[in-house]
């Protein structure tokens, strides 16, 4: 079966702009989580969506937001981009979420803010 | 908060067993040990998890000490494709929908 698909793979944006990243989960998976990975902070949890509702949120500013559609596809948006938002953004899907296993990660979107 | 301690890096000869340690001295009775790995430029991949018994699957074995304060992930015959960062995660089986990855161990398999 197809894996988790994230688009685009690479993105370059200017400081102050906004960006939208997309994640298509594995068919049948209803939970989608987003993570930010930077060399300094490592992998950090952003938020998780289940059945179109945000179920859990990490410690990130309100500039980071997301949503999930009825087909479980998810998007995350970052407004007013800062240089420090340059990172690899990963999404992970799972059937129900809430467990320590069963997550399948995509290959990520590498965002560069200049 | 980090509940695990892992060495920052390790080397292993190709074909030999790779033994990756993890200390989790404050683990609670209902917390499991999970292992993920991240190969360069890819998303993390689930490897194995366990509560107190040793576990084995097609990828690896997990050995948990009797007092559960530490564990070892064993890759029985390391290949070059096993070069990755390995993360040991401690958490309850179900609950909050996030994984805390910590800093992990960078394993380099040497030809």
Image: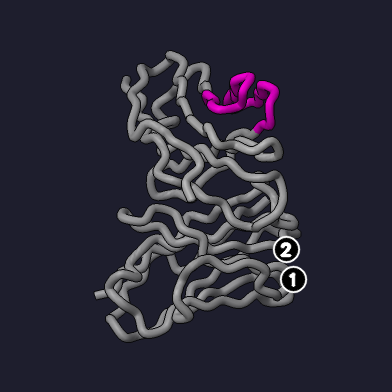
Q: Residue at x 44, y 46 (%)?
A: B102
Figure check: B86 above or below B53: below
Q: Which mark is residue A30?
A: 2
Q: Which mark is residue B18?
A: none
Q: Chain of mark 2?
A: A
Q: Label 2 near label 1: C-beta < 8 Å?
A: yes
Graded by Cα atoms within 10 Å as few (under 14), some (14 to 19) or many (20 or more), the crowding at tag 1 reads: some
The residue under label 1 is A51
Tell which of B66 and A61 is nearer to you: B66
Q: Residue at x 46, y 16 (%)?
A: B17
Q: Residue at x 29, y 73 (%)?
A: A113
Q: What colouring does the structure picture have?
A: one colour
Tell which of B45 and B81 is nearer to you: B45
Q: Residue at x 72, y 49 (%)?
A: B94
Graded by Cα atoms within 10 Å as few (under 14), some (14 to 19) or many (20 or more), the crowding at tag 2 reads: many
Residue A106 on the magenta segment: no
Q: Which badge, 1 or 2, is on the more N-terminal residue? A: 2
Q: Position of residue A38 (x, y in %)?
A: 35, 58
Please identify the quadrant where the C terminus of chain A is shown.
bottom left
Q: Which residues are magenta?
A: B50-73
Figure check: B30 above or below A3: above
Considering the numbered disc 2 on the image, is that residue within a helix, a strand or a loop?
Answer: loop
Q: Position of residue B77 (x, y in %)?
A: 49, 17
Considering the numbered disc 1 on the image, is that residue within a helix, a strand or a loop?
Answer: loop
Real-space CA distance between mark 1 and mark 2, rounded to the nearest whole angstrom: 6 Å
Q: Position of residue A42 (x, y in %)?
A: 39, 53
Q: Chain of mark 1?
A: A
């Amino acid at each position: 079966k197809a894996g988790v698909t994230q688009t685009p793979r690479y993105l370059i944006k200017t400081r102050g702009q906004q960006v939208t990243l997309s994640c298509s989960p594995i068919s049948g998976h209803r939970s989608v989580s987003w993570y930010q990975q930077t060399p300094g902070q490592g992998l950090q949890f952003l938020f998780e969506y289940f059945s179109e509702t945000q179920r859990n949120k990490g410690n990130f500013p309100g500039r980071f937001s997301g949503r999930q559609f009825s087909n479980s596809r998810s998007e995350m948006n970052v407004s007013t981009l800062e240089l420090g938002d340059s990172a690899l953004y990963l999404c992970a899907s799972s059937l129900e979420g809430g467990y320590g296993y069963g997550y399948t990660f995509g290959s990520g979107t590498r965002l560069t803010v200049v | 908060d980090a509940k695990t301690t892992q060495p920052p890096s390790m080397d292993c000869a190709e074909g030999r067993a790779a033994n990756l340690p993890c200390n989790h001295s404050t683990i609670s009775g209902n917390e499991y040990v999970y292992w993920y790995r991240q190969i360069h430029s890819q998303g993390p991949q689930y490897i194995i998890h366990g509560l107190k018994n040793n576990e084995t699957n097609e990828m690896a074995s997990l050995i948990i000490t009797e007092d559960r304060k530490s564990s070892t992930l064993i890759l029985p015959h390391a290949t070059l494709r096993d070069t990755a960062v390995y993360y040991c995660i401690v958490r309850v089986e179900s609950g909050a929908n996030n994984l805390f990855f910590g800093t992990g161990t960078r394993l380099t398999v040497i030809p």
